Image: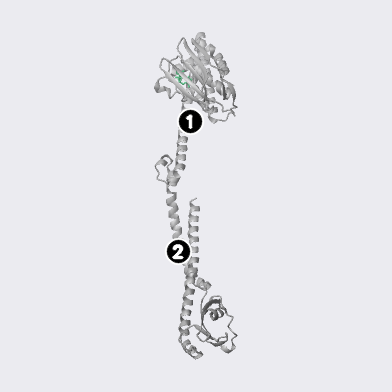
Amino acid sequence: MRKKINIQLIGIALLSMLLTMVLLLFVYYGIFQKQVLDELKTVAHMMGSMENLTVYSVKDYQTKLDNIRITLLDTDGSVLYDSDANAAEMDNHALRPEISVAYSNGEAYAIRESDTLSQNTYYYAILLDNGGVLRVAKEANSILSIFASSLPSLLIIIISLTTVCTVVARLFTKSLMKPIDNIAKDLDHMGEVKTYDELKPFIETIQSQHEDIIKNAKLRQEFTANVSHELKTPLTVISGYSELIENGMTGAEDTIRFSKEIHRNSTRLLTLINDILRLSELDSGEQNTPMEDIDLYELSDNCISMLQMNAEKNNVILDLKGPHLTVFANRQMLEEMIYNLCDNGIRYNKPNGKVEVSIRENNENVIFMVSDTGIGISKENINRIFERFYRVDKSRSKQTGGTGLGLAIVKHIAEQMNAQIQIDSELEKGTTITILFPKKVPS
Ligand code: ADP
């Protein structure tokens, strides 16, 4: 780009130089022509004003003038005298443009090419009192010869101006590119670089993209560290207990207890890995998500049936109310979402508690709500529970088979379904999570 700007700047400078020179050449040539003609006019009038201008007086005057050819013509155009040729051998001049016009209008001029291309002949003719015509003529350089003679100096000017332009263009491009160079050198502080207003939207976009990249890299790093940590605990337990059994150091009772632990922890590992895989699948956005109209009530009823046993085990009543409303969503995702929310409602509940799932609608949304009478979430924690692996009470989460990824998956799914999540909670009273599905625009 730098090179391109440089070349373009030099190109523009060269072109304007050439245009100016050609224009100046024509302007000066016009002035030069006028000067030559003015000189001839003055000479013609001075001679014409002499009384009784005769061949002899013309000859006499001729000696005082350099390079000026004088022709004296009779009333009919025949040549009486010519300073450069023998008048007797010359043909009638009445039809020469400057002479015929001088006969009719009193005076006239003409410029004609000489035998050599480099010279032009300038003529000025005036009508004399006696009816004859006096013509004065002079040879002068043509535009071509003026151009040719000034060519060396023109070339020197062009070369030196081009050199100056190249240096100036380079400096100019450098200063033009400086903000961009500075940004490229330090992407972290690009917001502080002084730049042009035109570049600001571009810089803002790059800046926010750069920040996103850094944030994502950090999140990924954190996630990997968390995953390793989460996997390590059950694996350590499994490895420890299995080693004890392997060494034959356990009695029959302990073996059963240890095997149970191994089983519990491997189930936990499986759940964890399933959730991690599900999240990365959602992250990549590669899975195909066929969307369809789904009866939200029916799907909720299915989930509740699946969770019924769990609820009973925890002494929690599961309830569903509301009309059969339809949402446009992916069935598997919607099911996962409802399941996770109801499961949390049961797991973070109190004995004899209740989880109520309700469905309703307003003008813009189909509203899905899971409300529990559980332990609630404090204000400090409420904004963080959708983060991956974030748990308020780690041991309770683990005990109840939680991975800390359930709500992260819910959040992801809601985003994909264009749904909004609202959360309301009070410690010891309970939690309500509301999902607002957009109503399908009738097509
Ligand atoms: P987990 O697998 O630990 O349940 P989630 O992502 O589903 O992970 O939830 C994150 C955390 O949010 C939980 O560990 C819990 O502390 C809190 N939480 C989620 N749902 C509820 C709820 N209904 N009542 C109280 N706390 C909740």
Give the Cα separation between the discs numbered 2 and 1. Answer: 59 Å
Residue at disc 2, secondary structure:
helix
- Some atom of ligand 1 lies within 8 Å of the CB belonging to the residue at label 2: no
- Amino acid type of the residue tagged 1 in the rendering: Arg
Q: Quadrant of the image for the C terminus?
A: top right
Q: How is the image coloured?
A: one colour
Judge by depth and name the residue closer to the eye, 82 or 271: 82
Residue at disc 1, secondary structure:
helix
Return the disc, 2 or 1, that comes first in the chain's sequence: 2
Q: Which residue is mark 2?
A: 160
Relative to 252, does residue 432 appear above or below in the rendering?
A: below
Q: Is residue 405 visible?
A: no
Where residue 44 sits in the image (x, y, percent)? Answer: 48, 82
The total of numbered circles placed on residues is 2
**Crowdedness near tag 2: few (<14), some (14–19) or many (≥20) residues, C-alpha within 10 Å:** few
Between disc 2 and disc 1, the foreground one is 2
Q: Which residue is mark 1?
A: 220
Q: Are discs 2 and 1 less than 8 Å apart at CB?
A: no
Judge by depth and name the residue closer to the eye, 359 or 42: 42
